[in-house]
Image (tube, helix red, strand yellow):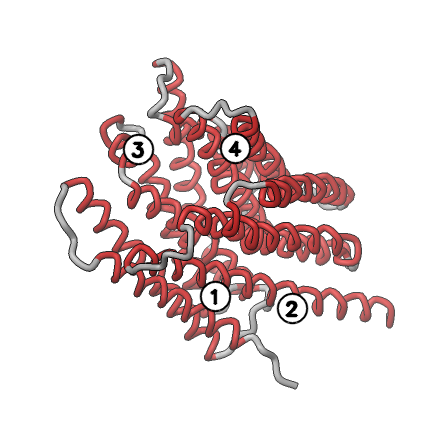
Amino acid sequence: MLSYFAEIVFMRFSMRRYTKIALLNLLLVAAIGVILRYKIAYSLPFIDQKFLLHGHSHFAFAGWVTHGLMILLLQYLANKTNDTVFKKYNWIIIANLITAYGMLVSFPLQGYGLFSIIFSTLSIFVSYAFAIVYWKDLNKLPEKSIAHWWIKAALLFNVLSSFGAFSLAFMMATHTLHQNWYLAAVYFFLHFQYNGWFFFACMGLATAKFFVPVPEMIQKKIFWLFALACIPAYILSALWLPIPGWSYGIVVLAAFSQVAGWLLTVQQIKRQAPFIKAILPPNTRWVLLLSAIALTIKLFLQLGSTIPSLSKLAFGFRPVVIGYLHLILLGVISLFMIGFMMLQNNILHKPASIKAIKIFVAGIIINEFLLMLQGIAAITFMPFPYINELLLGAAVLLLSGILMLNLSQRSTK
């Protein structure tokens, strides 16, 4: 009994520690975002915007999202096995953090150089190790559920996304960069990170927590509607390439499939509302609801992008692309992760932390609204005065919220 208690205490201690690191990493991502926005609005000659942007995006993926998803998935495994899985996975978590911080330092200094490529490559190999070890441990669980399907798909898509990164590295090493193939490789990586690894891991966690009463047949239907659509949906990010007509039809079906899967999910959420409300504290409920709303907007925007004229507008103007990517990373994924961390009590429920999250959410909404206006202004060739300064203000608001959240998590004896 004492041994079991010691294991649980160790697990909770690890979760608190790793959650604090995750929130610190999100703070660093937000701080770099402020610098990037400041350089656009004002002069900052000693900083290379492109190099810093690479560091910002790579660290956001590895240091915030991947690290956060890893510890949430490990917490799920620990709750199922009553085992201190953090002892087993500790080296993987630390290795991922080392590669994340390595990219955070090396990319702003040299862009795609020797050290940044080394750290980004090692980060991929760490994701391979996590996928292999976690897959094996998931198979050892006596209880089998559809949530495991989501998680395994997430691990597979994470591995698949690395092909885009390796293709990009090969083109750079052989000096065979071509604009279309370069963009195709970048969007391949982004698609299977955002819509594969990130999304499917979140859905796996949500399914395990909220979909227990949902009939297994319906759970399977929802999973396959998303899973079968994920690979062909990549072409939505590459409609500017010359593609045959039959493949365009598959893309449209994939977009409709994901919308259908989400509508079926929402239907089940409504049916299971009493069960979900019983396990969701009010402060957590609204955060996850906003994440669901952001996902709804994302899926319908994705469906709209199947119209060729709209697709050209989407990929032809940078503010639209940036707004869409931030909608997914901040609105869908980050809010889900913060809400789920609150649900698991990894984030302490304090008045200060709730206030901090509200400020962070306000920053997300204002940032998306301004990016939308900037995109409309670019499409219509209409000037938008002080838009860069306003976006800088939104970035500062995001930074303020996550800084307050970090400070609120300092536990007192």
Give residue 16's mark: 2
**In terms of depth relative to the viewer, which is nearer, 173 or 65?**
173
Rendered location of residue 19, percent (x, y): 61, 64
Q: Of all residues shown, which one is farthest toward the bottom?
A: 413
Q: Residues within 10 Å of mark 1 (few under 14, many from 20)?
A: many
The amino acid beneath tag 3 is Ser
Distance from label 1 to label 3 (Cα)? 32 Å
Name the amino acid type tagged 1: Thr
Mark 2 or mark 3, earlier in chain? 2
Q: Residue at x 58, y 61 (%)?
A: 22
Callout 2 touching callout 3 (CB < 8 Å): no
Q: Earlier in the sequence, mark 2 or mark 1?
A: 2
Viewer-proximal residue among 180 and 160 = 180
Q: Quickly name the residue at label 1.
A: 284
Identify the residue under disc 4: 227
- Residue at 35% from the left image edge and 25% from the top image edge: 239
Q: Is 308 drawn above or below residue 5 in the view shown?
A: above
The tag earlier along the polypeptide, 2 or 4, is 2
Labels 1 & 3 near each other (Cβ < 8 A)? no
Q: Disc 2 residue type?
A: Arg
Residue 253 numbered tag: none
Asked if residue 78 can be seen in this view, the reply is yes
Alpha carbons under labels 2 and 1: distance apart: 18 Å
Of marks 2 and 4, the one in the foreground: 2
User: What kind of residue is marked 4?
Assistant: Ala
State the SS at label 3.
loop
**Secondary structure type for disc 4:** helix
**Residue receiving disc 3:** 305
- The picture places residue 71, in percent across and down from the top left corner, at 64, 56
Mark 2 to mark 4 CA distance (whole Å): 32 Å
Cα distance, mark 2 to mark 3? 41 Å
